[in-house]
Image (cartoon, rainbow, N blue to C red):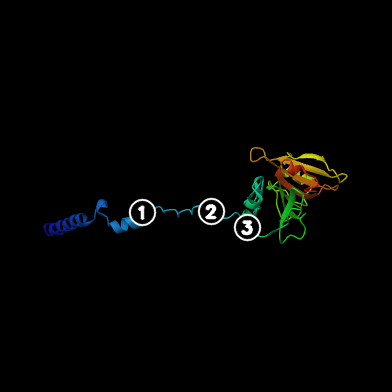
Amino acid sequence: MKSMLPIVMVAALLSACQREEAPAAADADPLTTAASTPVAETPAPVPAVDDTAAPAGPVSQASFLGYGDMKLGSTVDEARAAWGGELNGAPMEGTTCHYLWPKWISRPADFAFMMEEGKFVRYDVGIDKETAPGGGKVGMSVEELQKLYGGALKGTPHKYVQGGQYLSIDAGDVAPTKLIFEADATGKVTSWRVGLSPQVEYVEGCS
């Protein structure tokens, strides 16, 4: 029994040494701890909205204020300068009303600017390539127009076309102008115009 005491004592000493050498949880390897701890990912930055980009699709220059930079109520010279290109047409002797139209227009009835008493007072459109303020176009039906304008268009009988009609809407607080569509007997839009009163009401234009 005396011979076994040293062995037991040695074993106890070895066990105590092993306990002292084992690292405490607080002294754990920081690299190992960091690797085992999940790190929240930083979300990718959301790109800012570019509000300077041009809107998709064609943009009409027609408005209740005029056409492009040409403002209703401006002088003929101001309107010509705002157009910035060549305009055909000239007043006839003894008249106060005439039309001007771009050189690429073959018929003034397709697209023209009315000048009266030295002022730009109205523009007329008879082609489907131009869009009226609010979205109306030549070729639309009366039903489509009324739906587009929320039923706000006022209809009156056409002066020359039996079964045809005029559909008009005031610009309200936007400008002292009016938009008038002309529709044939089948209920299709054949032309439209925007202008100041009373010129926008001239059924025969400058005639």
**Rendered position, 18 above or below 146:** below
Q: Residues within 10 Å of mark 2 (few under 14, many from 20)?
A: few
Q: Position of residue 167 (x, y in %)?
A: 77, 42
Amino acid found under the numbered disc labelled 2: Thr
Image quadrant holding the N terminus, namely: bottom left
Read off the residue under disc 3: 84
Mark in the foreground, 1 or 3: 3
Left or right: residue 143 compared with residue 62: right
Amino acid found under the numbered disc labelled 1: Thr
Direction right: furthest residue: 162
Q: Position of residue 175 (x, y in %)?
A: 65, 41
Looking at the picture, tell me which residue is in the foreground, 37 or 105: 105
Left or right: residue 41 compared with residue 93: left
Q: Position of residue 17 (x, y in %)?
A: 18, 57
Read off the residue under disc 1: 37
Q: CA distance from mark 1 to mark 3?
A: 69 Å
Q: Residues within 10 Å of mark 1 (few under 14, many from 20)?
A: few
- Element type where label 2 sits in the image: loop
Instruction: Determine contact: label 1, label 3, CB under 8 Å.
Output: no
Mark in the foreground, 2 or 1: 2
